[in-house]
């Protein structure tokens, strides 16, 4: 048994050297799984609010340039305080405060909103004039067809 395990370890070391993996002589401790408490601490730290949350950070990734461009194209859509704030953020390259973020979140809503379409004046609908129906050949006997007495046309398709 001892001989067999040493052969396995030897083969393991050869393969480990081929792939630049640690050999069995360099591994001194056996890796273990993390404990339940370690996993819970990692989960709590992952769920703690480290990043700023809001529409401005989620949609625009804290970059006010898209807001600035839209404010230049359609300034009536935005609040005057929001316009001033965005211009200040662009000029000074600073991060907004929590109160300013609320104003920027409202501006992001306005950025993504679509204005209602302007009502175009309705044009009166004109219908094309009807063409008079062509006269059918009812009552005119068909040439070469003999019909029973009393019936001019026994079938509608004739």
Image: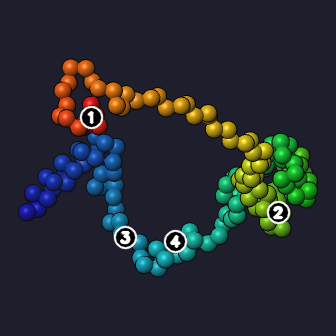
Seen at 33% across and 27% down, the residue is 140
| Residue 53 image offset from top left, x and y in percent | 69, 65
Residue 33, label in figure: 3
Labels 3 and 1: the sequence-earlier one: 3
Task: Tell me the residue that label 4 is attached to.
Answer: 42
Looking at the image, the residue that sits furthest to the top is 144
- Mark 3 residue crowding within 10 angstroms, few (<14) / some (14–19) / many (20+): few
Seen at 68% across and 41% down, the residue is 125
> Marks 4 and 2, how far apart in space?
34 Å
Labels 4 and 1: the sequence-earlier one: 4
**Which image quadrant: the C terminus?**
top left
**Closer mark to the observer between disc 4 and disc 3:** 4
The secondary element bearing badge 3 is classed as loop
Give the camera-side residue of 95 and 3: 95
Residue 103, label in figure: 2
**Closer mark to the observer between disc 4 and disc 2:** 2
| Residue 3 image offset from top left, x and y in percent | 9, 57
> Marks 4 and 3, how far apart in space?
14 Å
The secondary element bearing badge 2 is classed as helix
Labels 4 and 2: the sequence-earlier one: 4
- Mark 2 residue crowding within 10 angstroms, few (<14) / some (14–19) / many (20+): some
Looking at the image, the residue that sits furthest to the front is 149
Query: Can residue 115 be seen at all in this image of the molecule?
Result: yes
Labels 2 and 3: the sequence-earlier one: 3
Is disc 3 in contact with disc 1, using a CB cutoff of under 8 Å?
no
The secondary element bearing badge 1 is classed as loop
| Residue 94 image offset from top left, x and y in percent | 84, 53
Task: Tell me the residue that label 1 is attached to.
Answer: 153
**Closer mark to the observer between disc 2 and disc 3:** 2
Labels 4 and 3: the sequence-earlier one: 3
């Amino acid at each position: 048994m001892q001989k067999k395990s040493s052969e396995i370890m030897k083969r393991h070391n050869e393969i480990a050297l081929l792939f630049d993996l640690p050999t069995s002589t360099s591994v001194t401790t056996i890796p273990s799984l993390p404990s339940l408490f370690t996993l819970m601490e990692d989960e709590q730290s992952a769920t703690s609010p480290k990043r700023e949350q809001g529409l401005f950070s989620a949609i625009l990734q804290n970059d006010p340039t898209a807001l600035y461009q839209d404010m230049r194209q359609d300034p009536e859509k935005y609040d005057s305080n929001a316009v001033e704030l965005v211009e200040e953020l662009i000029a000074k390259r600073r991060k907004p405060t929590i109160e300013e973020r609320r104003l920027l979140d409202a501006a992001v809503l306005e950025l993504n909103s679509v204005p209602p379409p302007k009502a175009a004046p309705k044009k009166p609908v004109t219908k094309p004039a009807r063409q008079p129906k062509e006269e059918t050949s009812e009552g005119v006997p068909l040439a070469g067809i003999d019909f029973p007495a009393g019936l001019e046309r026994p079938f509608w398709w004739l």
